Amino acid sequence: MASSFDLVAINCNAFNSNTLNESLPQLDYSLNDTYKVVAGSLVFLLILPFVLFEFSCFPIGASSAILLGAVLMVATTVLSQGDFYDIIGEDGNMRTIFLLLGMMIISQYFEREQIIQTLINKVLKKDISFPSYLWRVTMLSFFVAALFTNDAACVILTPLILKHWCSQERSSVELETLLLSISTSANLGSVITIFGNPQIALIASTTENTVYLKSQLNLKRSVTYLGIPAILGYLLNLAFLIVHSRLNASTSCCAQQVPVAEEVHGVLPSEKDERGSSRVFFLLPPLLLVIMLVLLFVKTDELRFDMGILPMAASALIMAADVALNKTNPSHLIMKVDWNVILMFFGIFVWLGGVNATRVPRYVWKAIGLAGRPIDDAKSIAIFAVFVIFGSNVFSNVPLTIIILEQLQPCANQLDFVLYLAWCSTIAGNLTLFGSVANIIVAQKAKQTLNVSLTFGAFFKYGFITTLIITTQGIFVIYGLLQI
């Protein structure tokens, strides 16, 4: 993040307050000079449509568009060339990259060893009722997302579950609800852990900075404060999905089956990778994942485990063990990592660093009445929640999170700010099809696997009211937990 003052130079020991007050170092809410405001805003508005939508006349794609936006921020001198490297090399940004990369590599081994596929075969029995089928699917999606990010969960689970569902020749009336269950449950589960989704990883890595330690979101706090509302949200979502399936069944004139023959060949690229020959290695990825979770959970100020280095260390140990036990070169699995996402994050840090350098986001933050005040009353919480939920669906949740994190006050205790941001930006993904990359992945995999479409209208029809209800209950629960 681009700050208006040097965070490294701030000594929080000079400030005794745990809350926001005038004695703390103050953020600059004034606009930057006119040229930077105009140039930075124009670059942002020029690139944003290509991030959110695909244009057949200029199919640049989101990642390439964001990288172009980063270049333009430097080319227009909104950011200097030195700023470019400073932003890329910031501890919080690199920590986020290493966290996501480490978890992506670990998830590839879970996929190759068919650990999750084995679990699906055991859990999703034939001839069970659809409500029973639903809670098993949602539970799988919920917990896999918490461990491997919502995007990775949807990449792995969607084709596996659809293939399994299709092989059982279940009614096609179930399909829309099934797709909604995978994506919405993945988004809900991802809020529990600090590596559950990219925006939570950003929040956690940013608040690891010493000037934000009073507001730090670590694994223990995410499980404690976000776990309970996530579980309650999961139960609410499951109830809504069951109602959705019954409404679909009652309005459908017939219940057809989707034949297995309609599957697209090659839907499971992981099947091209042979499982390791060592039975000992099969147990190693889950074991190292558990050890990593324990170390992150018990982390204290005296006993520190970096949330970026630890996943990379775990993935390196798994790769070394794979070479030693299975005599397998890990380069093929490394190539299967979604490098498109990694490149996108490098670009997005700089592109939005330029936006923050204009100080327009801070100016807007002050205009809506959230500057320099705790988010602890009904009015401020409501304004904050509405801003984050709808902003996440207009600008996407990761860009909005980067912009909002720039408003975090150094040395102050703003844990409420951090928790509400983590909760609202994540659950906002269930509002529309474009609210989360995980939703788009499910829609794409459904098209590739069974040639069926999950439309924007169908998703919005389900997601609008349910997201507002689940978000509201979570805010109430988080507020209550903060009072204890």
Image: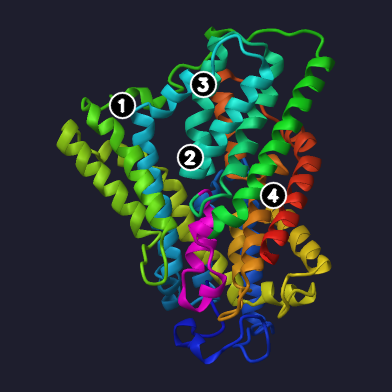
**Is 379 or 122 nearer to us in this picture?**
122
Please, which residue is most extreme toward the front here? 484
- Badge 2 element: helix
- For disc 1, the marked residue is 273
The main secondary structure of the magenta stretch is helix
**Is 41 or 175 nearer to us in this picture?**
175
As drawn, 360 above or below 473: below
- For disc 2, the marked residue is 152
Question: Quick one: label 3, few (<14), some, or many (20+) residues within 10 Å?
Answer: few
What's the distance in space between the residues labelled 3 and 4, CA to CA?
Answer: 29 Å
Q: Magenta part of the protein: which range?
A: 196-220
Which percent across, then down, holds residue 61? 54, 46
What's the distance in space between the residues labelled 1 and 3, CA to CA?
Answer: 24 Å
Name the mark on residue 123.
3
Residue 38 inside the magenta-drawn segment: no
Image check: 373 left or right of 186? Answer: right
Image check: 112 left or right of 262? Answer: left
Which percent across, then down, holds residue 142? 57, 38
Q: Amino acid at mark 4?
A: Ala
Question: Quick one: label 1, few (<14), some, or many (20+) residues within 10 Å?
Answer: few
Q: Nearer the viewer, mark 4 or mark 1?
A: 4
Q: Quadrant of the C terminus?
A: bottom right
- For disc 4, the marked residue is 428
Q: How is the image coloured?
A: rainbow
Earlier in the chain: of badge 2 and badge 1, it is 2
Which percent across, then down, holds residue 126? 56, 10
